[in-house]
Image (tube, grey):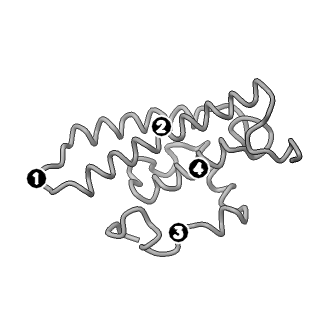
Amino acid sequence: MDPTRALVPADEPERREVLRVVACAMGALEKVVAALYEHTMRPAGKVHQPWIAHNEAQARGGIAWLDGRPGERWLTVDRLTQADITTTAMFDFTRIVNPGLVPAGAYPRLDGLSTYCNTLPAFAETQPTSAVDRANPGLPA
């Protein structure tokens, strides 16, 4: 494979930095999903609001860290990497399932990354197209 097309660079320190950003994005996604699960899958009387708040706070921390990354377009190196893909997928998913967690303008770096990535065919062709594609079909479209 052409190393310039690899989603995770083979050489340090770029490789470690891409993996660090991927780990943070996955951690934030896990917290978004934990809050979503608590809110949507438990019976109304069993929902533990402090657990939702705890997970949302941790997700916000990870999202804020990602938003604070230096650079103009990409999160790690001067091309698309797994860090950008994972972060955009997490950010877009969060917009669908918990838009209050990522209000427009609150995370300008990630807003820009998501907007740009979603113009690329690989992203544009995989956007949710119906309630069935969404994480919770009961959520508003």
Q: Is residue 118 above or below residue 8?
A: below
Distance CA(mark 3)–CA(mark 2)? 22 Å
Residue 124 found in image quarter:
bottom right
Q: Mark 3 or 4 closer to N-term? A: 4
Left or right: 31 as drawn, with respect to 71: left
Q: Mark 1 or 3 closer to N-term? A: 1
Left or right: 88 as drawn, with respect to 72: left
Distance CA(mark 2)–CA(mark 1)? 28 Å
Q: Secondary structure at mark 4?
A: helix
The amino acid marked with disc number 4 is: Asp
Left or right: 47 as drawn, with respect to 141: left
Which residue is disc 2 drawn over? 27
Pointer 2 with pointer 1, Cβ within 8 A: no
Distance CA(mark 3)–CA(mark 4)? 18 Å
User: Where does residue 104 sit, x and y in percent of width and height?
Assistant: 49, 52
Pointer 3 with pointer 2, Cβ within 8 A: no
Mark whose residue sits in front, 3 or 4: 3
Q: Secondary structure at mark 2?
A: helix
The amino acid marked with disc number 3 is: Pro
Q: Secondary structure at mark 3?
A: loop
Pointer 3 with pointer 4, Cβ within 8 A: no
Q: Mark 1 or 4 closer to N-term? A: 1
Q: Residues within 10 Å of mark 3 (few under 14, many from 20)?
A: some
Distance CA(mark 1)–CA(mark 4)? 36 Å
Residue 4 found in image quarter:
top right
**Residue at far top of view:** 13
Pointer 2 with pointer 4, Cβ within 8 A: no
Distance CA(mark 2)–CA(mark 4)? 19 Å
Check the picture and name the quadrant holding the C terminus: bottom left
